Image (tube, grey):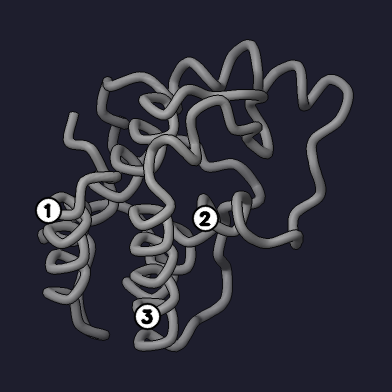
C-alpha cells in the first residue's frame, strides 16, 4: 500500500482530488462529490478536531475488536460497504470548501509525519502503529477517489 506520509504520495492524492469538480459523478454509491469530500474529512476530524464524542461501552469494544481489523489492514474496501454513523453526510456541502479542507488535512498529516502517528491513540481503535494509520488514511482516500473515477 502506498504511504500517505511520503510527500510524493500526498501530492498524488491531492492531484487526484484536484481532478474532481463539483459535477463529478460516482461510479457507485449514493454520495455526491461534495458529500464524499466531507465524508473523507471525518477521518481527520477524529484526529484534529474535538467534535465527535469518543465511543464508550459496547460500541468501543466492537470498534476495537471487530471494525479495527477491517479499517487498518491493507485489503481494499468493498463497494457500497457499511459506513459508521459519524461518517454519514446527509446534507449538501460546498464543493470548494470541502475540497480545500480535505487537502489541508492531508498535507498537515504528511507534514507531521509517520513518527508523530506511531503509537498515537486513535479516536476509536486505541493506539495504532504508523503503518495502521497509513492504511486507514490511504485506503479510505483511495477507495473514494476511485469511486469518483480519479
Q: Which residue is mark 1?
A: 8
What residue lies at 12% left-to-right and 53% top-to-bottom? Answer: 8
Question: Between marks 2 and 3, how big is the CA–CA gap?
Answer: 13 Å
Mark 1 and mark 2 in contact? Answer it, CB < 8 Å.
Answer: no
Residue 65 picture quarter: top right
Circle 1: is it few (<14), some (14-19), or many (20+) Cα within 10 Å? few
Question: Between marks 1 and 2, how big is the CA–CA gap?
Answer: 20 Å
Residue lying furthest top in this view?
A: 65
Residue 32 picture quarter: bottom left
Question: Between marks 1 and 3, how big is the CA–CA gap?
Answer: 19 Å
Left or right of 121? Residue 22 is left
Left or right of 78? Residue 132 is right
Give the answer, above or below, for where 13 lies relative to 117.
below
User: Which of the two marks, 1 or 3, is nearer to us in this view?
Assistant: 1
What residue lies at 56% left-to-right and 22% top-to-bottom? Answer: 67
Q: Which residue is mark 3?
A: 100
**Which one is earlier in the sequence, the residue at label 2 or at label 3?**
2
Residue 41 pos. (x, y %)? 48, 61
Marking on residue 44: 2
What residue lies at 68% left-to-right and 39% top-to-bottom? Answer: 123
Which element type, helix, strand or loop, lies under badge 1?
helix
Quarter of the figure with the N terminus: top left
User: Which of the two marks, 1 or 2, is nearer to us in this view?
Assistant: 1
Amino acid at each position: 500500500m502506498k504511504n500517505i506520509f511520503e510527500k510524493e504520495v500526498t501530492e498524488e492524492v491531492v492531484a487526484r482530488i484536484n481532478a474532481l469538480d463539483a459535477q463529478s459523478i460516482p461510479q457507485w454509491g449514493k454520495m455526491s462529490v461534495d458529500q464524499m469530500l466531507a465524508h473523507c474529512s471525518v477521518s481527520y476530524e477524529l484526529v484534529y478536531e474535538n467534535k465527535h464524542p469518543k465511543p464508550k461501552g459496547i460500541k468501543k469494544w466492537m470498534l476495537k475488536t471487530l471494525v479495527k481489523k477491517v479499517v487498518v489492514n491493507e485489503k481494499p474496501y468493498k463497494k457500497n460497504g457499511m459506513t459508521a454513523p459519524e461518517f454519514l453526510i446527509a446534507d449538501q456541502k460546498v464543493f470548494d470548501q470541502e475540497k480545500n479542507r480535505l487537502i489541508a488535512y492531508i498535507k498537515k498529516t504528511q507534514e507531521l509525519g509517520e513518527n508523530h502517528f506511531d503509537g498515537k491513540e486513535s479516536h476509536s481503535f486505541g493506539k495504532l502503529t504508523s503503518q495502521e494509520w497509513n492504511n486507514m488514511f490511504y485506503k479510505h482516500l483511495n477507495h473514494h477517489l476511485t469511486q469518483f473515477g480519479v
